[in-house]
Amino acid sequence: MPATRAGGFLSINALALHFGTATFNRIVSMKFSQIYRIFALSALAYAAGVTHLARADELSLDSQRTRFRVAYEAAQRGVGEWARLAIGLDTYPLYPYIGLASLKRRLPKLSRAEVEQFLDRWPDTLPERDLRNAYLRLVADRSEWATFRALYRPGSDRTLRCNELRAQLAAGERLDYALDIEPLWMTASPSPSACDPVFAWARASDKLDDGALWTRIGMAAAEGRDETINAVVPLLAESDRDAARRIATAVRDPAATLAKIDGWKDDTRSRDAVAFGLARYARRDSAASETLWASLQSRFKFDKDQKNRVLNALAIYRSTSYSPDAIARLDALPADAADDTSREWHVRVALATQDWKETLAALDDLSADQKTDPRWRYLRARVLAKLDRKAEADKVFNSIARVPGFYGFLAADWISEPYAICPRTLSNDVAADATLMKQPDLVRAFEFQNLGMLPEARREWSFAQEKLNTAGRERAANLAFKRGWYDRAVYLYSAAEDTQRYYEQRFPLAMESHVRRESRDAGIDPAWAYAIIRAESAWTTDARSGANAYGLMQLLPGVAKQLAKSEKLPYSRPSDLFEPGLNIQLGTRYLGQMAEKYDGSPWLASAAYNAGSAPVGRWLDARGDLDPDFFIETIPYRETREYVSRVLAFSVIYDWRINGKVVPLASRLPKFGQTYHAPTDDTPRKAVVCDAPDMAQVASNAP
């Protein structure tokens, strides 16, 4: 029946006919905002061709998609007409989500029969698992353990696992420590509250003794997890609780806690609190922690482990701030107090002082595993060259020059060798791809992606991956790549050693004309812009960081607003940054500004893009005379240190993907104060070669 319209919505008569008199009367008694929403949904429904006569075989895929959006939103909002709006969608891949939305909205009132009907209709699907798990949490809260046990399926959800154990206890069954308790207990991370009754039973049943309790407290304290310590406190004997709380407060607020140390007894738990507190305090103020440590050693009889914990922290955090006594601290560190982190910082501090003999000694002191890392092998070669031991240096450079990454590329530059990038191509198997596209979970993932519902798409993708073998996952990632869902391919192919040579998929040349144009307008190298996108978001268009950065190039809303205003680009709200075109426009301009601030230098601009200009300024004031590769290694922030080397390596790979040859990485590392000009089409580039047998051996070191 055709609908008459008024102002873009259905007329009152049409709505009354559409909903029926009883439903219509309920609607008109609602708040205006609710009425507006329902009328809008109904208008959309009619625009999509939703009538009581619609059949599945009458609908095109586009019509199904439009109708799904309307019906799904109606079900989420509790609009009673959702079932009518869903007519004709029973063959649509996302159809079960409409029913799921309606059931979850009514979850507290659902009967077990309604839940089981849905589970039976959609077995082995993500909607089935979602409803099952949501209902299991509800019945666990009600202590309906028989229902819980009937519906529970093993999985990775720790809350549900603890509730399953509670159900067993309610049935009078006993639990096994190694099988049931230990996997949940032996972690520094906080446990779900559902585990508390299980742990209480284990404690009362002597499954958790004092040793197990204090072991977990020690694990949590070492990782700064005071919330975990506080959760253990009720399980301790009354006489031990204050000691545990003291450790928790020392971890959470070491300065304030250690300032009240005068009345503490010299016992094991007090010494633990002091040692854990000082180790945490050293992160924030190594000088104050050092002073306090010196004053406390005569008051407390610290054991070796406690001393080593503090000495290790002081040595490391005096090093991260490049304090004058850092080398002395590291040299004085007892052998059993040293670890890989302290050994790495010994190298960095020595590099910062440009004491090449001390640096070489620190490199010699690295662990066997560390010495195999291209990073430390490269730095060893550089230091050997500084000591005029060129033959030894070249031998090391040769050994890593085939590694397709930051250090391998730099090593190849030092010995004037071509870069070794050996791409692989996924075989074309039409039959295998066709079979994959019949996998319902994967179909739902791609359909959500088509609708732009990316969080939902990623959940279905992960669910589908659980059912695929290795070859299937690789082919699925390639299908995602072909459909423009690049981040799925980037993440999957970058995770496994034998897929890291799928460079086309791992480094997509998406939106190439747009990236080239915007980079040119911003005065920067398109390969660098691509590298920033790849490093920032891995092509996840809706990426949003904990620091509230948005989109492909991870822009902060304040920066984006200012840029948009100065560049006269459209921008009204942070979510606009999820639009790839706008994000790239703004991001390349911001990169251009960063480059201009640092004389065009891409490595310094990349550091500032990640850490901010203020920290970079401090680092340059302290160590700006270092060679750029040494400077990068001495960046105090691990995230920024690795970010810069990753972006530079990605720039090489994208340069190769765009031009076939590459601008040498060494030329992208001008010394601080030197002017750098972005490469052009006429800039000389070096060759890239493929030595397949060798590449298989070094793929695990690829960026």
Image (cartoon, grey):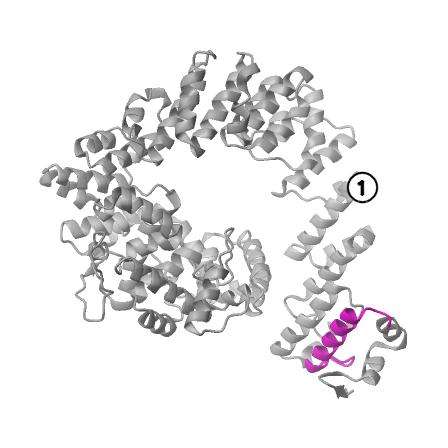
Q: Is residue 256 above or below residue 93?
A: above
Q: Quadrant of residue 380?
A: top left
For mark 1, give the secondary structure: loop
Q: Amino acid at mark 1?
A: Arg
- Image location (x, y in percent) of residue 182: 60, 28
Q: Is residue 392 magenta?
A: no
Residue 5 visible to an observer of this rendering: yes
Q: Residues within 10 Å of mark 1 (few under 14, many from 20)?
A: few
- The residue under the point 21% across, 56% down is 419
Q: Quadrant of residue 359?
A: top left
- Image location (x, y in percent) of residue 113: 82, 53
Question: Quick check: 429 left or right of 662?
Answer: right
- Image location (x, y in percent) of residue 175: 69, 27
Q: Is residue 11 above or below residue 592?
A: below
Count the marks: 1
User: What residue does disc 1 label?
Assistant: 142
Question: Quick check: 116 left or right of 392?
Answer: right
Residue 423 visible to an observer of this rendering: no
The one of 651 and 238 positioned closer to us in this rendering: 238
Question: Which corner quadrant holds the N terminus?
Answer: bottom right
Question: Quick check: 276 left or right of 402?
Answer: right
The one of 522 and 689 positioned closer to us in this rendering: 522
Q: Is residue 378 above or below residue 536?
A: above
Span highlighted in magenta in the image: 29-55
Q: Quadrant of residue 661?
A: bottom left
- Image location (x, y in percent) of residue 612: 39, 52
Q: Is residue 38 magenta?
A: yes
